[in-house]
Structure formats: structure tokens, C-alpha cells
Amino acid sequence: MLDIEEISLETLRGEKVCLRKIGEADVPALFQLVVDSREFLAAHLPWPADVISEDDVQSRLESWELQADMGSGGCWGIFHEGHITGCIILGWVQKEHHSATISYWLGKPFTGMGFATDALKTLSRFAFETLKLNRLEISVSVNNLPSVAVARRIGFQEEGVCRQYERINGNFEDHIRFSLLASDDQNHS
């Protein structure tokens, strides 16, 4: 079993983005990013409609901080030139199995610039090298082609389709499950 008592939300630097802990001062900008991109985000994610105030953002961040304190996950803001562009989350850390999941999102104005790719590559490297995980998983809606492309670009391998995996806008959507192993091609390093 891995000996992860706490996940340090240390600043991680990629080629284009910086991943860092989201502070209280970042909450207004993060909330505004969700508001400005709500329709865009809601096309593939179940939670944007639930974020109706800065307090909702703060509550989500507090739950991720608790998970980091327990060594079971963490949330980093994706920053470019000092501006928050989205979030990337390491979740469901299974210490016995040396595995975890990753999810990510960007505000609409920041898509297509390589930020998600860089963030995923950076967090994957941290998960393998620092946390000593062996397996990372991502589940992406079959209809979210840009996110599917991000996972493939980093070297995540498609494992199959999870039927009716998530309910989005009242409809059950299939998701593609991807994985990346520490022993896979070193695209993540």
C-alpha cells in the first residue's frame, strides 16, 4: 500500500500552464469563469448548474482540501499568465492499488490553446513520479470529442465504453474509459 498521508497541493509547472492550489482570493474569478462558461461546461458536465454562488465554489474547494488532507485527492487551478482558466482534479486515490482518476475542465475562452493537454501531462507526471501511482484513469463523454483528443494526445489508452455512465442534462451519456500506466510510453514525463 502507498504511504500517502496527505497530498501536497504544491505548485506544478508545465510548459504553458501552472497548476496551483486555489486560494480564497481566487474564488471570485473561478466563480465568474463558471458563470461565463456555464452553458459550454453544462454540455458535458453534470455540476455547472449547481454552482450558483461563490459559496458553492468555496464549498467544493473545501471538500477537495479535505480529500488532499486525507491523501485521497486534490484540486489544482489551471493558471495561465496568472489567470485561472479551469481546474484539474486528482480523485479517488486508491492507495492499495496505486491508482487514481483525473478530471479536468477549462472555461470556454481557454479551450483550443493546449492548456488542458499541458495540465494533464503535468499532473500525470506528478502522480507517477511524486505520488508513485501506477495507474491513472479518465472517463470522458463520448460526445466530448475535444476532451477525448486530450486524453489520447497524452498517451492514455482507450479501455472501452461505460454505458450510461453519467446523467447530464437529464440524459444518460456513455463515457469512454481511458487509462495511463506508469510503465506506458513516457509521454507523460
Image (cartoon, rainbow, N blue to C red):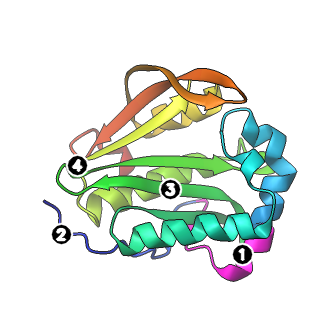
Q: Are marks 1 and 4 in contact (CB under 8 Å)?
A: no
Q: Position of residue 69 (x, y in %)?
A: 39, 75
Disc 1 and disc 4: Cα gap in Å? 32 Å
**Number of the front mark, 2 or 4:** 2
Residue located 61% across and 73% down the image: 22
Marked residue nearer the N-terminal end (4 or 3):
3
At 33% from the left edge and 68% from the top edge, which residue is drawn? 71
Q: Secondary structure at mark 3?
A: strand
The kind of residue on which mark 3 rests is Ile
The alpha-carbon separation of the residues under discs 2 and 4 comes to 14 Å
What residue is pinned by disc 2? 3
Q: CA distance from mark 4 to mark 3?
A: 17 Å
Tell me the residue at 45%/72% (across/down): 66
Quadrant placement of the N terminus: bottom left
- Check whether the beta carbons of the residues at disc 2 and disc 4 lie within 8 A of each other: no
Going from N to C along the chain, the mark reached first, 2 or 4, is: 2
Residue, disc 4? 134
Which residue of the protein is positioned furthest toward the right in this rendering?
36
Q: Earlier in the sequence, mark 1 or mark 2?
A: 2
**Which mark is nearer the camera, 4 or 3?**
3
Q: Which residues are magenta?
A: 16-29
